[in-house]
Image (cartoon, grey):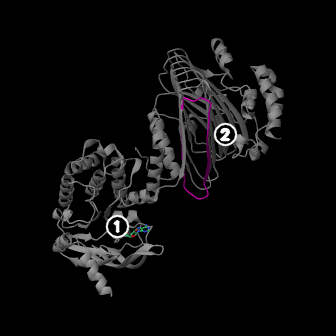
Amino acid sequence: MLKIKGLKAGVEDNNILKGIDLQVNKGEIHAIMGPNGSGKSTLSSVIAGKEEYEVEGGSIEFDGTSIMDLSPEERAHLGIFLSFQYPVEIPGVSVSNFIKTSINETRKAKGLEPMPAGELLKLMREKMELLDIKKGFLSRSLNQGFSGGEKKRNEIFQLATLAPKLAILDETDSGLDIDALKIVANGINKLRTPENATIVITHYQRLLDYIVPDFVHVLYNGRIVKSGTKELAFELEAKGYDWIIKEVEEQCI
Amino acid sequence: MHLKEKLISAFDQSLDQLSFQQRRKESMERLKQDGFPTIRNEEWKYTNLQPLLKKEFELQASISSITLEEINEYILKDTDTYLMVFLNGVFQPNLSSISCQKAHISTIKNANEEQQKIIEKYWGSCLPKKGDAFVSANNGLAQEGAFVYLPKSVVLDKPLQIVYATKNDNALFTQTRSLVVVEENAQVQITERHQNFSDSEVFTNAVTEIVVKQNAIVDFYKIQNDNFKCSIVDNTWVNQANNCNCTVDTFSFGGKMVRNNLTFSMLGEHSESNMRGITLIGKDQLVDHHTLVDHLVPNCLSNELYKGIYDHNAKGVFNGKVMVHPDAQKTNAFQSNNNLLLTDDASIDTKPQLEIYADDVACSHGCTIGQLDDEALFYLRARGIPKKEAQAMLMYAFANDVLNNIKIEELKKKLNLIIAEKIGVELAIEL
Ligand SMILES: Nc1ncnc2c1ncn2[C@@H]1O[C@H](COP(=O)(O)OP(=O)(O)O)[C@@H](O)[C@H]1O
Ligand SMILES: [Mg+2]
């Protein structure tokens, strides 16, 4: 589904991603871990098409075709979804209107009519229930004054209503207490099908107790320095990142 | 001929037929002496009128008919309203519906004898003794115009729409004059629109006086979406007695040069004035808002919120003056002016001007100038909302709190559509 080869990207003279290779097939869950500042958010933004980053080399293919020249909205229309580490507050745009516009613009891009209002409402209700979201939520201004947890839950709510092929969850667990984490993880698991895939970006192994990855990658200093299965996550939890960093640095010397 | 000379000579020829002769004469004398303002005048620093004033304008239009079909697009249709249509300053009874039991809606000219007394009393009462050239010219020569009178305790059952239409073969200078008097405990909602229906240039000088008595409530909505050949100087003067509430909202989308002079005089205690605006303009457009709230007595509240979005090489001016006189203790005066510049060529000159001579007051002002937030744009686009629509959403969101205050639902919808059209997107968002 997603095939990244030799991806290099950065801003002006700051190289952030220094050659990333990653392949995600449908049905799989990949976890990307790594210390702060490794480039995890940059990688997810580049996949989603953020124009601020310059891609200096490599390729990104989605379902067999290059998406390098596509705008963020075109990538979204193909089914790429990024759950933001820091969702943006947009006063004056309500959650429901945002989701409605998002769904209908995506449908429009596919040549479909707007979703009938009743159907839309039903869809939102259903997903609100799944994620234990309260009623007044829909009419609130997007992310404005939301707690960290509410923001993350809102991201997963959008994920649930949009049902993308590939979901990239950037630090979705941060800001969530354990109960909320369970609800969100349960929501994400329920949305899984053999046809879609998920990339979970996280610092901590905690989330991976609930969303069990098929593969775990460690991103450090713009490179994937180690890949493995879920056992790697346990190892990281027990030993921290230092041993990997050391390993990498020794290799470099 | 320069506009000033033209007006003076027209006045000399028509004086015999005019009402309020003495007042008119004095005003025209003042125009003669002062002339129209130049950019050396502090109040007109950013808006140069000289090209307009030098242009050859006709003072009398040659076209005298307009149809309901033409008007239709510019009025609210799903809401039951009273409607006054003027063409080139002349009232069009066949297109209007003004028959009203409890209130009086007519032209200033055609008011009955009893009403003439009221007009005599209030005509010019909100204006300063020494008005500027536009007020003077309007005082001198404006004739027909809307007269709305709400007797005590009358709540007008439906909004009134006033359309000042213009249509001419050649460039036209026109002056409209409206007088709204709302007695104790009465209420009224009015929308007003100046609209050109021809390809020729129009320069309008409008004066509206609004007299708000004790406990009255007035909502006045100005929709400025004229075509790009039209310019207007729109002068609105409000006198408020005690315990009353008056709102004047100005929505500026169209026109080449739009200058709004809006003045509130707070003459009675415990009154509230609201002035809000959305300005959304683009190529070669200028919108200049000059507001003044004159707090003369204690315990009043004035609330001012203007939002501007400027594209291409559009120019915006906002000058918000608040005067708090020594007696006006416990005044609350809030002002804010927020602007988005969409390009490097667009500009806004914004100047809050607080003059406070009382010590126990709460006054604040703030202005912001910014661009659309890139992070927010990316967020929306990453959810499949195309760039243009995403920009539109952010602009709607930006202007939203002004739109939300509108009390006439259909007007809100109509403005939403105008905004969508102006931005070039299909969506009209219910935010
Ligand atoms: N827009 C940007 N401009 C400049 N530096 C950036 C930008 N985005 C990310 N960086 C830098 O790139 C590095 C990786 O950041 P990020 O991708 O956010 O890491 P992570 O998500 O792994 O914590 C950091 O050093 C960060 O400061
Ligand atoms: Mg990050």
Q: Looking at the image, which residue is at 80% across and 30% down?
A: B30
- Circle 2 sits in a helix, a strand or a loop, which is it? strand
Region rendered in magenta:
B334-361
Q: Nearer the viewer, mark 1 or mark 2?
A: 1
Q: Which residue is mark 1?
A: A41
Crowd around label 1: few <14 · some 14–19 · many ≥20 (10 Å): some
Q: Is residue B232 left or right of residue A245?
A: right
Residue A219 lies, with reference to residue A89, above or below; the image says: below
As rendered, which of A53 and B74 lies closer to the eye?
A53
Three-letter residue code for mark 1: Ser
Question: Chain ID for label 1?
Answer: A
Of the residues shown, which amino acid type is indicated by label 2?
A: Ile
**Residue bearing the label numbered 2:** B232
Callout 1: helix, strand or loop?
helix
| Disc 2 chain ID | B
Determine if marks 1 and 2 fall on one subunit.
Answer: no
Residue B115 shows in this picture: yes
Residue drawn at (20%, 62%) of the image? A207
